[in-house]
């Protein structure tokens, strides 16, 4: 088992990729209606004003999106899967549900989901330590670093790495509590829309996982797309 030295700077990535240099704009503000592409294995951050609608698109159907949100005026407040479980009484958010922060305040409302609704709120984002557990010796792109780099790219720093909302990730939960990783059941072109209930910074990672079937079998991690509509 690989032992990992605790990070002294949570916001510093363990490696780099295009997430660090391909911000949608210097401050992360989007052009309304423009469709942005998140490169395969990379991440992007976007600033959302209250009432704006973020739509994330899965062009291939098999690509998982790790998703986070932070309060714009206090990055210590973030979308919290544990608090969502309590608020919803479920581990499966669905259309119409409001997703809350670690302060139990509304952050986003899930307004549309064209997929069968299979997403994950249990599994941590992949990171360099996870890939070392899976046998990697060299650095492997990962969602935790994509979050760090996407925030750095718009002039911010991640104070922590919250558990993500793993959109389209298929992790069946057995009655005995065990989990397993399965390919997504979403289809090409599926989308999910989230309305900001406060001013937020949202971050998305086109998950680089290629050592388990979470991004499909016999395919490689690929792009995601997103757009923002004014409220």
Image: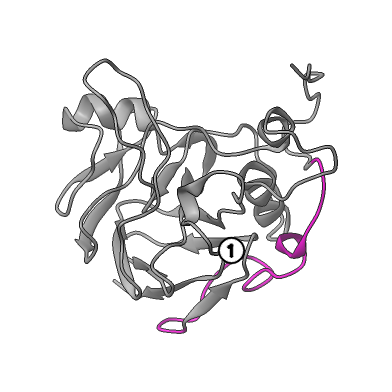
The x and y percentages for residue 85 are 26, 28
Q: Main secondary structure of the magenta part?
A: loop
Magenta residue span: 14-34
* The N terminus lies in quadrant: top right
Q: Is residue 230 left or right of residue 59?
A: left
The x and y percentages for residue 26 are 69, 69
Determine whether 104 is above or below 109 in the image: above
Looking at the image, the residue that sits furthest to the front is: 218
Determine whether 12 is above or below 203 in the image: above
Callout 1: SS: loop
Q: Residues within 10 Å of mark 1 (few under 14, many from 20)?
A: some
Taking the spot 82% from the left edge, 19% from the top edge, the residue there is 5
- Whether the magenta-drawn stretch holds residue 165 is answered as no
Q: Is residue 206 left or right of residue 174?
A: right
| Residue 91 or residue 158, whichever sits in front | 91
Residue 109 seen in the figure: yes
Residue at numbered disc 1: 220
Determine whether 226 is above or below 173 in the image: below
* The C terminus lies in quadrant: bottom left
Taking the spot 73% from the left edge, 53% from the top edge, the residue there is 152
The x and y percentages for residue 95 are 17, 54
Taking the spot 35% from the left edge, 74% from the top edge, the residue there is 188
Determine whether 190 is above or below 102 in the image: below
Q: Is residue 2 left or right of residue 220?
A: right
Q: Quadrant of residue 61?
A: bottom left
Residue 66 seen in the figure: no
The x and y percentages for residue 165 are 40, 43
| Residue 61 or residue 92, whichever sits in front | 61
- Whether the magenta-drawn stretch holds residue 19 is answered as yes
Taking the spot 56% from the left edge, 55% from the top edge, the residue there is 205
- Give the total number of marks visible in the rendering: 1
């Amino acid at each position: 088992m690989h032992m990992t030295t605790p990070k002294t700077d949570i916001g510093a990535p363990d490696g780099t990729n295009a997430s660090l240099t391909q911000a949608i704009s210097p401050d992360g503000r989007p052009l309304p209606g423009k469709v942005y592409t998140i490169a395969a294995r990379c991440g992007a951050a976007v600033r959302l004003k209250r009432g704006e609608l973020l739509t994330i698109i899965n062009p291939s159907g098999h690509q998982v999106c790790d998703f986070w949100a932070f309060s714009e005026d206090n990055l210590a407040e973030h979308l919290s899967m544990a608090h969502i479980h309590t608020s919803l009484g479920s581990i499966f958010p669905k259309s119409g549900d409001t997703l809350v922060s670690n302060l139990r305040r509304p952050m986003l409302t899930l307004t549309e989901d064209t997929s069968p609704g299979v997403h994950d709120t249990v599994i941590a984002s992949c990171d360099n330590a996870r890939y070392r557990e899976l046998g990697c010796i060299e650095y492997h792109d990962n969602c935790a670093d994509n979050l760090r780099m996407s925030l750095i790219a718009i002039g911010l720093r991640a104070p922590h790495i919250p558990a993500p909302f793993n959109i389209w990730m298929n992790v069946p939960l057995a009655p005995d509590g065990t989990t397993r990783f399965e390919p997504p059941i979403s289809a090409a072109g599926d989308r999910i829309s989230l309305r900001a209930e406060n001013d937020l910074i949202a971050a998305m990672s086109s998950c680089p996982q290629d050592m388990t079937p979470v991004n499909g079998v016999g395919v490689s991690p690929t792009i995601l797309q997103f757009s923002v509509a004014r409220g």
